[in-house]
Image (cartoon, grey):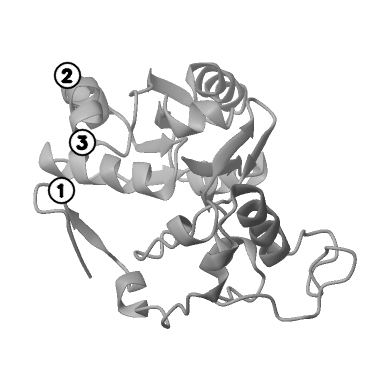
Amino acid sequence: MIGTTKKPLEEVLAALAPYRKVAVVGCDGCAKICQTGGVDEVAQLARTLEAHGKEIVFEATPERTCNVAKSDPILKPLTDKIQEADALLVLGCGGAVQITRYLTEQYGLTKPVKVGLNSVGHLDTVVPGAVAMEECSDCGECVLNDTGGICPVTRCAKSLLNGPCGGAEGGKCEVDHNRDCAWILIYERLKALGETDKLKRFMEPKDFSKMAKPRTLYIKEGRVAS
């Protein structure tokens, strides 16, 4: 999922300062899990905006706002309401904001689309409702088959591919003493699996062109292009 945190109310109000009629669009996918933009958070912020003099034209919470197929059936019937709004505020990731902007343009409307959240990247739920951790860097060349399911690109502070740097102390990273050394974790995992021979494999340098942004995934072809 895409992790999000709430922007300070002052920042949201500043972004909406020129506008009186506001539509609030949440996301019942990632933002719901992060407790930043689900139905409850949309309603809560809408009431707060009303208390600050805004008129809420509508509230909507597509299942996944970054997905056109999920958002369009929710937003298209609201085209007249979108037309009435001075601006849309999206409680979703940056992708959700831009898909909302894209759809309003598809409806022939030019409306300011503002964001109420900060996106903090691809995170995975560790403790539901409490903790999510970045486990994957979306590098385009997954090495988890050879590292016991622990990503050195993400978990190692130096993103080393062929073993530890040698600076760890007490199992902790020399760059961040609160972080476990990824390569010690990988060694212990491979040892438990009886697969330490995999540590002898040399990993070639990554093809960083696969991380060039913005990337496009051609789903049927399974092809990624920048």
Q: Depth check: 172 or 113 in front?
A: 172
> Residue beneath label 2, please?
77
Whole-angstrom CA distance, mark 1 to mark 2, is 28 Å
The residue under the point 19% across, 39% down is 103
- Amino acid type, mark 2: Pro
- Which amino acid, mark 1? Ile
Q: Is residue 125 above or below residue 98?
A: above
Mark pair 1, 3: CA separation: 14 Å
Label placed on residue 206: none
For marks 3 and 2, the one nearer the N-term is 3
Q: Quadrant of residue 108?
A: top left
Residue 226 in the image: x percent, y percent? 23, 70
- Amino acid type for the residue under numbered disc 3: Val
Mark 3 lies on a secondary structure that is helix
Query: Reading the chain from its start, which is encountered first: label 1 or label 2?
Result: 2
User: Horizontal placement of 113 versus 177: left or right?
Assistant: left
* Residue closest to the eye, 171 or 67: 171
Q: Which residue is mark 1?
A: 219
Q: Which residue lies at the image location 43% right of the left edge and 37% below the top edge?
A: 89
Q: Mark 3 or mark 1, which is nearer the start of the sequence?
A: 3
Q: Position of residue 81 (x, y in %)?
A: 25, 23
**Circle 3 residue:** 68
